[in-house]
Amino acid sequence: MNSSSPTLLAYLSVLTRCINFTAFSVFLSLSSLFSAASAACLPPPAGLVAGWPLEGDGSEVLDQHPAVLLGSPASGQGMVGQAVIFDGINDSARVAASPPLNVGTGAGLTIELWIQPSDVAQLRPLVEWNNGRGTIGAHFWIAVPTAFTGGPGSLFGNLVDISGVSHQISTSTGLLRSNVFQHVALTYDRASGQAALYLDGNTVAQTNLGSFVLQTSTDLYLGTRPSGVFSGIWFKGGMDEVALYDRALSGAELAAIFNAGSAGKCPPARPPQVTAHPQSVTALVGESVQLDVTATGTPPLTFQWWFEGQAKAGATNASLLLPSVQLTDAGEYWVVVANAGGAVTSQVARLEVIPLPQCVRSPAGMVAWWPLDGTGDDWLGGSPLLTEGGAGFVAGRVGQGLGLDGVNDYTRAAASPKLNVGVAEGMTVEAWIQPAQLASLGTVVEWNDSRGQIGAHLTISVPSAVSGIGSVFANLMDTTGVPHQIGTAPGLLRTGVWQHVALTYQRTSGETALYLDGVVVSQTNLGVFVPQTTSDLYVGV
């Protein structure tokens, strides 16, 4: 006999002719996910393109433009949390070029950060666009020599344009202090041409440089100039809370950032992302259906479900429960997930609602019918199924069903002339099954004399050499012991779901077919013979 897998059998019937079938199935399961929270801080101004808190690494607040720390920068106390400490020898950070960081093509820019220079007399780079091959872009430095601009303790910006022309702005000497965190900023408004330098929220230099396109298309470096004139110079000291904007911030906005002090800027809201979309489902009238979405993003997340183009009143959770669906509930559903960072719309899930099925008249030719509603009785009489092992009854597809453990549970109907359907004009075996696993062979029904004579049988997951995992397979052994096989492709069956399987054989023509949920999944002509059905009939083994 074949070994069985843990399976639930809803009902089983054997007929002496071929019939067609219809079936329904329902499956739905999802869950929801939320991410964690924020702190008391200053909301970042509009136009933030990227921000590097430098909490010991190069993480970027929008998770779009991480900085790679080069050399071995240390981590130390910053103005806001931690800062990176550059050694002035070979420590720096690099951010790969990307279109969002190419702010020079837009309305303007702001670079703002906290610095704690170890000394303010030496020329030191803060932020610079540079291609690493000699092309220098816009940059923000300190203590550029007096021969060029402000000298020790000064701030300096050179808004190099895409033609390589310099546009410089500098403060006077002696503004910066060593070993103290100070907030510095460089702004440029392309429409007006106005550029400004800020120290601790105050304007310390401003001028009109004219309107041009800045060179910001290359990699962005913190604390070094990797190529070009004055390359090989490194920033020495602490650097914290570097931020880049695609517009010129106002003096008031920069003063607010400075005044926020150690509270810093709030991490910007990460826009929501749907990581698991609601799934389409088919349900019977009156059944309960739940649609779910899984989303991530900065909380709080809000949810609004939509049905057929209209916002559904009160449907504002990650799950939408429809406790007793009706035909009018059929249609398209989706959900909009939103937070302070934006909104995203899920994929559409379609709900199909099917009218309650009516019981159908038993097809002609039925010789035995085991509903398995708490007993193994044959409702047509004469061939009860006797349970063996620990076979019991569980919730089935129609009423109750038979629960089999895949170890030693099975049922058996004694041989009888009426079960010897092989001598008739044809035969059909059909049943609802709910496999618990599909990794190993499982028998639905088999005629077997328990002394080695195997008769006709219907099985699932026959080894791949024959059919494969998740397949339906039948072998109509004839009365001379010759096998006549038919199988489906693997992967058709599902675990934990009720599915209707059937085998039909028309002896007069040889036509043979396998059905899954009322649909033909394999058919062939096996020829004319008499299937071996004279012995006991086993279910589940």
Image (tube, helix red, strand yellow):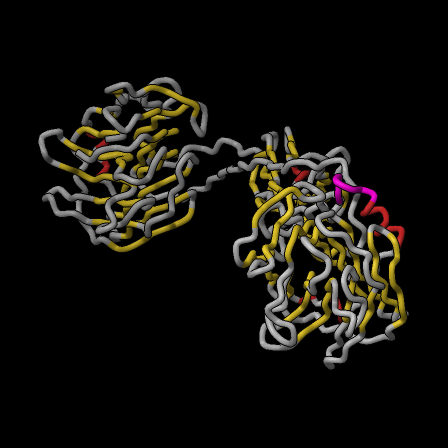
The image quadrant of residue 453 is top left
In the image: residue 5, left or right of residue 352 = left
Residue 29 image point, x, y percent: 53, 36
Q: Residue at x 22, y 51 (%)?
A: 465
In the image: residue 448, left or right of residue 523 = left
The vertical placement of 201 against 288, above or below, is below
Q: Which residues are magenta?
A: 259-264
Q: Identify the image quadrant of the C terminus.
A: top left
The image quadrant of residue 321 is top right
Magenta stretch encompasses residue 260? yes
Q: Identify the image quadrant of the N terminus.
A: top left
Q: Residue at x 74, y 47 (%)?
A: 180
Q: From where the camera sits, is residue 107 visible?
A: no
The vertical placement of 527 against 371, above or below, is below
Q: Nearer the viewer, residue 490 or 517?
A: 490
Q: Nearer the viewer, residue 402 or 340?
A: 340
Q: Nearer the viewer, residue 6 or 384?
A: 6
Residue 120 image point, x, y percent: 73, 58
- Classified by dominant secondary structure, the portion drawn in magenta counts as helix
Magenta stretch encompasses residue 177? no
Q: Nearer the viewer, residue 349 or 111?
A: 111
The number of numbered badges drawn on the structure is: 0
Q: Residue at x 53, y 37 (%)?
A: 28
Q: Residue at x 58, y 49 (%)?
A: 57
Q: From where the camera sits, is residue 84 visible?
A: yes
Residue 396 image point, x, y percent: 43, 26
